[in-house]
Amino acid sequence: MTARLLSQGRLVGAALPRRLAAPALGLLLLGAGLLLQGRHELNVALFLRLQALAAHAPDALWAGLSLCGLGWTAVLLAAAASRRDAWPVATMLWALVVGGALLHGIKLLEGMPRPAAALPPALVHVIGTRLAAGAMPSGHAASAVTVALLLCWRGTARRGIAPALALALLVGLARIAVGAHWPSDVLAGVGLGLLAAPLAVALEGTRPLRGALQRPAGQLLIALLQLGAAPGLVLQGHDPLAAPLAWALGTASALDGLRRAGSAWSAWRRGRPVRGEPLRAVAHGAAPAAPVPATARPARDAALPRGLWLAWAAAVATLFLLRLGAAPLFDVDEGAFAQATRELLASRDWWHTTLNGADRFDKPILVYWLQAASVALLGPTEAAVRLPSALCAIGWCFATAAFARTRWGDRAALAAGGVLACSLGVLLIGRGSTADALLNLLLVLALFDLWRHLESGARTPLRRAALWIALAVLAKGPIGLLVPGATLLLWVLARRRRDALRRALGDGVAWLILLGVALPWYAYALQRHGRAFVDGFLMRHNVERFTTTLEGHGGSLLYYLLVLPLLALPWTPLLAALARQARALWRDALSAWLLVWAGFVLAFFSLSGTKLPYYALYGLTPLALLAGRRLADPALSRGWRRALLVSWAVAWLPVVLAPWVLLRLAPRAPNPLWQTLLATVPPWPWTPVLAALGGAAALVALLRRQAWQLRWLAAAWVWSLLVVGAAVPWWGQALQGPICRLAAVARARAPLPTVVQWAVNQPSFAWCLGTPTPRRLPEAGEWALVREDRPPPGDYAVCARERGFALWQRLPEGRRDDGDGCR
């Protein structure tokens, strides 16, 4: 009867209903819920009776049904139903606005406690998180009813609305079964859903979003919502029984979002001009924009086989995913990011990070969100916290190859992407749980789109660049704006193209995107922390990093001229070839853009007081592009080929001679800890080294009939596999192995003792231990991670020793170590 009544009042397209059946029934149920709330004894009796009935079904069923009522699930379903028409997702967005306002308004007015807080624990069977406040009404029930009505109204109402509403009502029952809501809350939530759905359809009829969402920009927005639904489904807190379903729905959402994003990207690319003519000759009555002369697209006969591209893509992905969790987290950076992410998940305070319980202002929030999503999906492992960086590094290489392909052809693209992926610096930073791989990806996307805007005059690439810059600012701060902005300004001044600068800076939509994405988190952090945020983040970790030397990371003006060749191994000779061609390259507009980009990064960080090797990577991509183009040039002389052979041999030497070199350096180390660590390194993995040498020789032999550039790329790939698959894990065990083994000793004690760090800064110790370990002097009975050459004051018992580090327990005053160890 209800299904027939609602089907008679169904809406077609954006038309208003002839009968207000759904709103009338919604008001009735909302009123019934409020009346039942006033009858507390009846409400409690119904709750207990329904919980008793629900106990006959498995908890996993109710946990899964409860998951289906999340707002993220509603977004996922609406987006999945919007493959050909954006009406479902458009109305769902209106429903989220209208329903969310009504829902939170009622919750604020009512303030009703949930069953788990109002009843004795023995009476309430709780599945998942025990909630305390915000009972009336049920948001899950409202969301489930809303999405059921919207999807059925767009289809055949008579056949679909009955089972859809039945499933929605089961979601409401599940909220009672998990102990989260009273029956009155569910009634009110169902009524709210019946109100929100027709209001959303009416708003879509008067203020349509469908047309905007069907454009490429709108499709990209839907894709971002789908990608956001993946971590949202997991991070919103469910019973572990629902985790497989959350993971499955999140994966489906992410895959469909990637498909939609690819389609939107293709639509944008089809709208981009082929040979540099502006997309729109006249904008707002202005004179036609003069595009930058661009290199013509490569001829069709320059295309490489699709199989070769697939093999290249698989090879690049392997470099960043192979044995991703084999090495322990390296201190200080990796350990700090990983432990801050774990504390973010534990606190569920998604807008602020702490490290060992203390406020952490080192970096903005974006990378922590990505790492938190990965850890929530995969568990607290080294591979999970490194996965966002690995995926960003893969995207970084793919974006570089795609940019080169449309301008210089397939061979140059393959070479440029290969040079970047197999460079030592990219290999290392692309597998670290830090913000730098993410920042590099966003910088290259922003600078590539800025160039597309300059060469075509189109506004769409400019607005995309604004989005990438905003995300870069959320990833690592002002540097995300400084590098693209300075590159644009310097190139415009050097090429005397001030009209291009006026067009770039005069787009109001781009500014709205930039400020709308980047500013909210900064405003929140400033409002929450005030002066502490200004001093900790803006001043210390940005201004002071440039004006002074922090944490001993200094260097001369020539620092990056020495570091960059090492980061570019084994392709260092190509940088020398570019230096010899610099004057000729400057005459080409695109090459000049790339040179300005790299030159600004090197000059700016050379002037900085604080210098770290990976800062140079922000300018390595343009050099890799030019080096790849040079490598693909058939006219590259034999002299440069011999130089590449020498560079390749130099890159192999540290891998082969590492044990002998470290043992020789051990007595000369600056302190006893490093002397101990270097003198007691684990056995060198000779088997992978010999296998890699043989594999490189075999691969080059198999490709003897192919172009010599392909043989070089194959050999560099094998060397890169050896670095990431054997050398880095070995070095990680040499440096960080003692930390994790001592954490395992403390973790094996029951109950877990309170552990602190004294005179050391090893955030990975807290990660391995699974709990924060603040840096302070231990109190009586507490354990402390110490360096054996820097013992703390007082009386201690030695719990464990491991290659220069130790766990000590502070003894109460007057007690001496009796040799029995820690208690």
Image: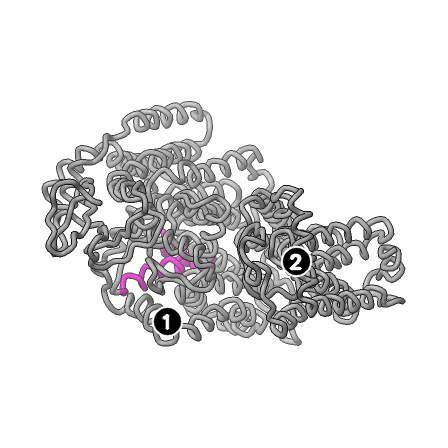
Question: Which residue is rendered at x = 38% and y = 51% of the image?
Answer: 338
Question: Which residue is rendered at x = 66% and y = 61% of the image?
Answer: 138
In the depicted structure, whether residue 477 falls above or below residue 627: below
Q: Nearer the viewer, residue 264 or 790?
A: 790
Residue 199 at what x, y percent from top left?
Answer: 76, 68
The quarter of the displayed image where residue 118 is located: bottom right
In the rendered structure, the answer to whether residue 214 lies left or right of residue 589 reads: right
Q: Nearer the viewer, residue 188 or 395?
A: 188
Label 2: how many residues lie within 10 Å, few (<14), some (14-19) or many (20+)? Answer: many
Answer whether residue 274 is visible to the viewer in this image.
no
Question: Which residue is rendered at x = 69% and y = 70% of the image?
Answer: 38
Quadrant into which the C terminus falls: top left
Identify residue for label 2. 140
Q: What amino acid type should be assigned to the residue bearing mark 2?
A: His
Q: Nearer the viewer, residue 151 or 220?
A: 151
In the rendered structure, the answer to whether residue 810 lies left or right of residue 163 reads: left
Q: Magenta span has 409?
A: no
Label 1: how many residues lie within 10 Å, few (<14), some (14-19) or many (20+)? Answer: many
In the depicted structure, whether residue 521 falls above or below residue 344: below
Q: Which residues are magenta?
A: 581-608
Q: CA distance from mark 2 to mark 1?
A: 36 Å
Q: What amino acid type should be assigned to the residue bearing mark 1?
A: Phe
Q: Which mark is residue 533?
A: 1
